[in-house]
Image (tube, rainbow, N blue to C red):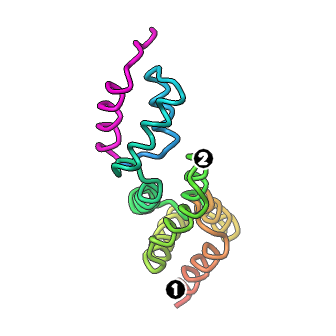
Amino acid sequence: MLRSKLTPEQAWQKIRHYCAYQERNHFEVREKLFGFGLRKTDVDLLISRLIEEDYLNEARFAIQFAGGHFRLKKWGRVKISYELKQKRISTANIKSALKEIDEDDYRLVLLKLAKSKWQTLKTEQHLNRRAKTTQYLLQKGYEAPLIQEAIEQIRNAAKE
């Protein structure tokens, strides 16, 4: 079914609510506006207006996305960075968003995930256990050197 074309003023009302409800990035807002049947010039004007009136802020979006996905989904920096790139967020905003994640919390979550995965694999041989735990943490977006540190910590704790 074809959507009826909105006037720029009707689109402004809708997009303002869309951005006020949840942080959005420029790309998804642009796509939404084009979905309303607007021309490029109208879309550009509305995006400028959203930025001026602080409904749209890429840096704020990146920080909220990074923090939320770390806290709720336990994603690592690699995966968060990748997802933000997919959303066409600038490298500078990605870097500053990742800096907002507390290093101690980050390592603590990584260690907790590693311990949990390690426990579920207690019937596995050591090399399999290590490989599967590493693979799981890489998929979650954690950095290989930090994963190896966490696994060593778990192994050393088990020896004591």
How much space separates mark 2 and mark 1, taking CA atoms?
39 Å
Q: Amino acid at mark 1?
A: Ala
Image quarter where the N terminus lies is: top left
Please report the bounds of the magenta region as a residue range.
Answer: 1-22
Instruction: Residue 107 in the image: state x and y as whole percent.
Output: 50, 76
Q: Is residue 156 left or right of residue 105?
A: right
* Position of residue 36 in the picture relative to residue 132 (left or right): left
- Nearer-the-camera pick, 158 or 110: 110
Q: Which mark is residue 86?
A: 2
Instruction: Determine the residue positioned at 62% across, 63% down.
Output: 124
State the image coordinates of residue 101 (x, y, percent, origin top left). 45, 71
Q: Earlier in the sequence, mark 2 or mark 1?
A: 2
Residue situated furthest top in the rendering: 1
Q: Secondary structure at mark 1?
A: helix
Which x, y percent locates residue 117? 52, 64
Query: 43 or 84: nearer the eye?
Result: 43
* Residue 64 highlighted magenta (yes or no): no
The residue that mark 1 highlights is 157
Q: Residue furthest right?
A: 127
User: Which residue: 56% across, 46% down?
Assistant: 87
- Mark 1, residues whose alpha carbon is within 10 Å: few (<14), some, or many (≥20)? few
Between residue 29 and residue 7, name the one nearer to us.
7
Secondary structure mostly taken by the magenta-highlighted segment of the chain: helix
Above or below, 116 relative to 68: below
